Amino acid sequence: MKYWKLFAAFVALSLCAAASAQDLKPVRDRDSKLFGYQDKSKNWVIPPAFQSAKRFNGGFAIVEQSGLKGLIDQTGAWVLKPEYDNIGKFDKSGLCEVTVKADRVKRRGLADQSGRLVIPVECYSISVDRREDLILAEKDVEVERLGVRPMWGVYDMQGEEIFAPQFSSAPSFSEGRGTATSAYNSLKGIISTDGQTLLPFNNLAISSRYGGYSVLTSDFVREVYDSRLLKTEDYAYAGYVRPYDPAGDPVRAAAWRVGAVGHRLSRNNLKEVRMNDGYRNRSANCSDLRLDWGYDRFVRLEPAVDEGAHPGSMLEPNSGLYYTVKAILYEKDGTPVGEVSRWGWFEGECEEGIIYNAEGAGLWMAMRDLNCPAVPAFSTSITGYRTIDHGSVLSGLGLSSYELDKMYNPETAGERYVEIITGENLGITAMQERPAPDLRAMRALDQAMRLPIFRRRFYMGQVVNCKTRPVEGGLELELSDRLVCRVADNFEEPSFSMKGEEEIFWGPGNARTVGLSLESVRPDPACTADDLYDSGCSFIVVLNLYEEDGTFLRTLGTAPALDFATDGALVFEALGIALLPEPYEAPASDNRRSSLGRWSSDDFRAPAGERAFRKQVINGAQRLPATLSALKGAGETLRSVRPAYNRGGYGGRNSYDGRGNYDQRGYESQGGYDNRSDSRSVHQNGGSYQRGNNARQR
């Protein structure tokens, strides 16, 4: 009882003191023009000494002297000396925010009721998490060459550091754990309020899930953790490729996708060359590199620090280090096989490609065209050739000093790291098999897939980008000489999305094919209706890419219906894709074309405004109704079309298995060969090459 009485007396005294403080009012003295505080009897309790004064709140009042604000108690004693541009109210945790403005930049701190600065006045932003008893503050961190950069740290309510400033945004906590984003690689991890890193910062997205977490890792594995942070399941997305690794090197990060650096170069577009200087123009004899290309292996040309002082090494002006360019062979999934050129440099560039000098022993050309014909040797003219100055990494790799300097900033370097991961894996959700059809639609789907339009295969050069424009009496098609697909990857639990464009690679022998299929969807008047089999179902048309043997590879896109079918060409307006009866041929008047005759629009390749295209007007073209009968009619026009040769391969018939997959069956087609080879000599621009065998297996 004695202790309770003492406690009650203490509370009563505190309330009395607070009440007396509330009774004090700020009053301006007529003589001095300064403010002080008077009681109800108009007696000066705190003499006038302030330029301005506010009412007491919670036993404290904000006053101003010499243009700066401070905090006093009810006796007039300073709790916070007048050193601040602004002082906030004390919150329930007994802390108030103080602000100092210097050179138009506001710095913030936190003070307690004793006047102690819990968080020094050096922060850009401060957030108090009262549920977790944490303080989140954004402070400056010293970064090499760039000076200070703001990052977020985590502190307890006494200002003791739990996590040093290292996060790009304020972590979000719940029940002792929180998700945070590293300022050094822009990836996410899980931390605890006691200073532990529970999940490393190696993830693209993290979300809470039934007391646990759903995680999308940087190598596109979906992981699920329970409330104890024990992994309960993981699922790897097909098609993941280990990306180009910046390795924390600003030169490597800045050089990704600049010139020929970082691109996946296949057997088709990385050739050994022998330069010929003619009287009027320059030419090159191109042949296959003597590498073990395996199946779908690729080479990346990558800058690396040169510790051996090799010829052609390039100076990095900021660090004083010298760099060389290595050629590294990778498996299809990005697993390193080995260095095929330990050092080298870029010697020159032309409209046809970029010349790489491999260890001073041979010249390689990274062709600008992603989809060069799969031929072992050919000759091509060289236009617009210029020598590359490889004295520094700026000129030798085609970098700008601004772009290189940005890579020393952890924030922009981290953003580039995520850009590389997503850029290398754009379209990864298209690697998944299409969903199973609705049971009610299976019969109609099986019958519809027997229509001629779904038995046809389209090859490289037959599937191109197009734009449509209505003209008087018909339709104008603008056909591009390439195939770039718009990609939108959407992941759920955790939510993550990627959007962009991706140029399609047609395989090591350019023998991959595109085929159409149907997929059942919920009834939708905008989608293809079943007017043939009376199922009442709706469908969308799916464009799929297949390997040479007919194995499903990926989905290129989906359209609600086929828009136009004219002169044997199938046009999907929403996708900007046309399927042509014959391979695309660029206009003969286009003098920019090499003997390979193909261009593309990536920044490593031809600019978008300079690619080859042709316009074609289709008189009397009518938009097709969104029905199966329209697809049937479009397929009938394909029967009379001569099967097209593929550059490097020849197509066969395919059958649908009811699940969106096709089994390829060889057959003897008009002009084709069955289990035999066809070797022909083809001449181009004064050069020649032997066309590869056109053989099919039965």
Image (spheres, rainbow, N blue to C red):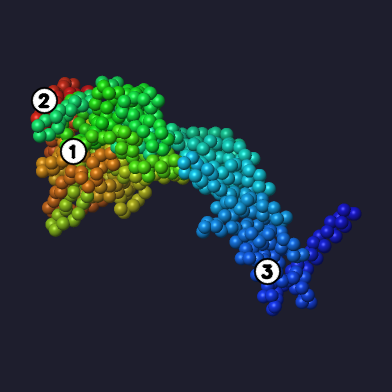
The mark found on residue 50 in the picture is 3
The mark found on residue 516 in the picture is none
Placement of 601 over or under 693, stated as above or below: below
Say which quadrant the C terminus sits in.
top left
Placement of 546 over or under 438, stated as above or below: above
Residue annotated with mark 2: 681
The residue lying toward the viewer, choosing from 341 and 544, is 341
Q: Amino acid at mark 3?
A: Phe
The residue lying toward the viewer, choosing from 54 and 514, is 54
Q: Amino acid at mark 1?
A: Gly
Left or right of residue 75: residue 210: left
Q: Name the residue rendered at 14%, 54% in the picture.
A: 474
Q: Name the residue rendered at 60%, 41% in the picture.
A: 163
> For numbered disc 2, what is the local secondary structure?
strand
Q: Name the residue rendered at 71%, 59% in the picture.
A: 79
**Where does residue 540 sit, x and y in percent of width and height?**
31, 46
Q: Nearer the viewer, mark 1 or mark 3?
A: 3
> For numbered disc 1, what is the local secondary structure?
loop
**Where does residue 534 sit, x and y in percent of width and height?**
29, 47
For residue 227, what is the image quadrant? top right
Residue annotated with mark 1: 384
Q: Are marks 2 and 1 in contact (CB under 8 Å)?
A: no
Q: Residue furthest right?
A: 2
Q: Nearer the viewer, mark 2 or mark 1?
A: 1
